[in-house]
Structure formats: structure tokens, C-alpha cells
Image (spheres, grey):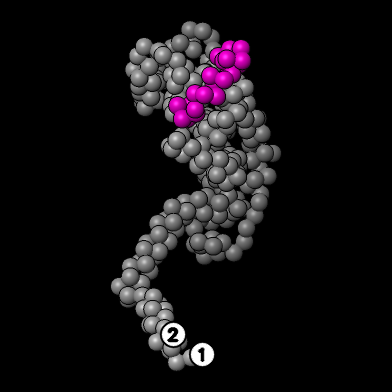
Amino acid sequence: MTVADVPALAVTSRAVATRQRVPAGKVVKEILFYLAVAIVVLIALFPFYWILRTSLLSNQQVAAGVGGANGIIPSHLSGVAYKNVFTQASFLRPLLNSVVVALATTAVTIIVATMAGYALARLHIRGAGAILGFILLAGFFPVLAMIGPLFLVLRYLGWLNTIWPLIIVYLVYTLPIATWLLKNFFEQIPTELEDAALVDGATRLQTLRKVVVPVAVPAVFTAAILSFILAWNDFAFAVSFLTSTNQFTAPLAITTYGQSQYQTFYNLIDAAVVIISIPIALLVLFAQRRIVSGLTAGSFR
């Protein structure tokens, strides 16, 4: 090191020291921020923890109530409630009903919403904005206000107490958001891709199926996930149109579990809640990147 390098080294040392000195007020603000975030997360997750905790208690522990060995963290956990849900409560049939209805609703939603969204985005339809507004308005319409008219229609057609009409009824949940999402995404796709396919002799439907949909896979995947979740979690329509236990969907079947003449076994109820929550949790966990990309892909050109 030469004498000429000493001033430069001193300047560098002072710059590093300046960067390393963080104001105390900023440190306190960061600590308070992360503390607040931790508190909010704990408050949000505590109900889920309590449901999981209760589902792992035995019938004797539930009867004993909260306290002692059955505190916040029980001293003994048991999986008997999960066994009883399938053996005593016959939960497999409602689960199968929910899977069939949710998958069928998702398939119908994607087909209809894809064609509707493409038509609203590309075809010169008079009043397209009003049509989209009506679709969104239907999605925000109170569900309880629709149950009465739908009940009368299904009763007139003889379609009560069967899961198949739910596939059409659930479109009230799924179709508005899927149509809006896909329409916005289709508008961001360059028209040159479609023009090239049309020049080559493809029809509009062929262009949609072979050119547009492959490009719009993130949005289609996101719409499918959201539709499945909405159909899977429904309770209002199911409880209004189904009366036989062998036709119940999983959320509706939970209301019949855990009841006895003298006691309610919440471990059985919560075990069923955990079971129907697992598919949604796994779906969101493994597809969260797809969901985010599908929701944001149409935001920028």
C-alpha cells in the first residue's frame, strides 16, 4: 500500500461505517412492524389450530372439556375421530358427491366462460359492456334472494333432492368471476396470432381452441381453481335443495355429525372440517404461483 492509497482507504472506511449505522428509530419501527405482522398471523391461524387440535382429541377428552390436560396443547392426541368419520358417519359418500359436483361445475364453467370471455373480448357485440356488467351484477347478487325462485323452479321440474341440478346452480358462483377473468386476459393477447390462424383458414372456434386457449393457460387454470373452490365450499344451495343424507355434499353432511342426545362431539365435526379443507389447502399450496400469474398476467402488455 502506498501513501496515496491512505486517503482513499479512509474515505471508503467512513462510507462503510455510515452505511452500517442504522438509525435507532428505523430499527424500532421494523421491530414493531414484524411484531404486528406476527400477532395478526397468530390471530388468523389460531381458529385453524383449534379445529385441528379438537379433531385430534378422543371422545373422553371432548367430554372433559377444556382445561388440565386438555389445554391449549393437549397432553395426548388421538386419531379416533377421523376413523369414526368414515366408519360411523359414512363421510365417503358426501365427499364423493362434492368431488363430482365441483369437478363438473368447474368443467362447465371453463367451457362457457372461455367462449363468453372470448366473445366479449374480440367480437364486436353491441352492448358488450352492459352484458359484462350484468354478469358481474349476478355474481354479487345475494344468494339468499335467489334460493326461493330457484327452489320453485327445481320443484316444478322435479329436480329437488339430487346433486345434478347443483352443477347448474353453482354457475351463479363461478361463471361471473371466470368470465370476467378470462375476458380481461383475452384482451391482452395480440390479435396478430388470431389473424394469422384465420388467414390460414381456421374458424373462430378453432382459433380459440388451438391458438388462444394455449396462450391463456395461466388464466384458464386460475379460473378453474377458483371455480372448484367456490363449488366445493357451498353450503347455502345444498342445504336448500337436498334432504336425503345420501345426496348430501361434504359441507352439508358435517351438520349431521357429532350429535347425540346429551352431548355434541366437536372432535367428529372438526375432523370432517379438516378432511374437506385438505383438498383446498393442497390445491392452493401447490398452485399458488399459477393463481398469481393468472390473476396478474393480463395486467401488462
Question: Residue 67: x and y, percent?
Answer: 49, 62
Q: Main secondary structure of the magenta part?
A: helix
Based on the displayed image, in which of its 4 quarters is residue 172 positioned?
A: top left
Q: Residue furthest bottom?
A: 3
**Pointer 1: what residue?**
1
Amino acid type, callout 2: Leu
Q: Residue furthest left?
A: 25
Question: Residue 248: x and y, percent?
Answer: 57, 27
State yes or no: residue 149 in magenta.
no
**Pointer 2: what residue?**
9
Which is more toward the observer, 192 or 288? 192
Say if residue 173 shows up in the picture.
no
Question: Residue 203: x and y, percent?
Answer: 58, 12
Q: Is residue 22 above or below residue 74?
A: below
Q: Tell me the mark number nearer the camera, choosing from 2 and 1.
A: 1
State yes or no: residue 199 in magenta.
yes
Residue shown at the point (40%, 57%) measured from the top left: 40
> Quick one: SS at disc 2?
helix
Which is more toward the observer, 290 or 227? 290
Q: Is residue 233 left or right of residue 247?
A: left
Question: Residue 73: x and y, percent?
Answer: 54, 62
Crowd rating for badge 2 (residues with CA inside 10 Å; few <14, some 14–19, many 20+): few
* Residues drawn in magenta: 185-208
Residue shown at the point (62%, 22%) measured from the top left: 210
Crowd rating for badge 1 (residues with CA inside 10 Å; few <14, some 14–19, many 20+): few
Q: Quadrant of the C terminus?
A: top left
Label 2 to label 1: alpha-carbon separation = 10 Å
- Marks 2 and 1 close (CB-CB < 8 Å): yes
- Residue 273 disc label: none
Amino acid type, callout 1: Met
Q: Residue furthest top?
A: 156
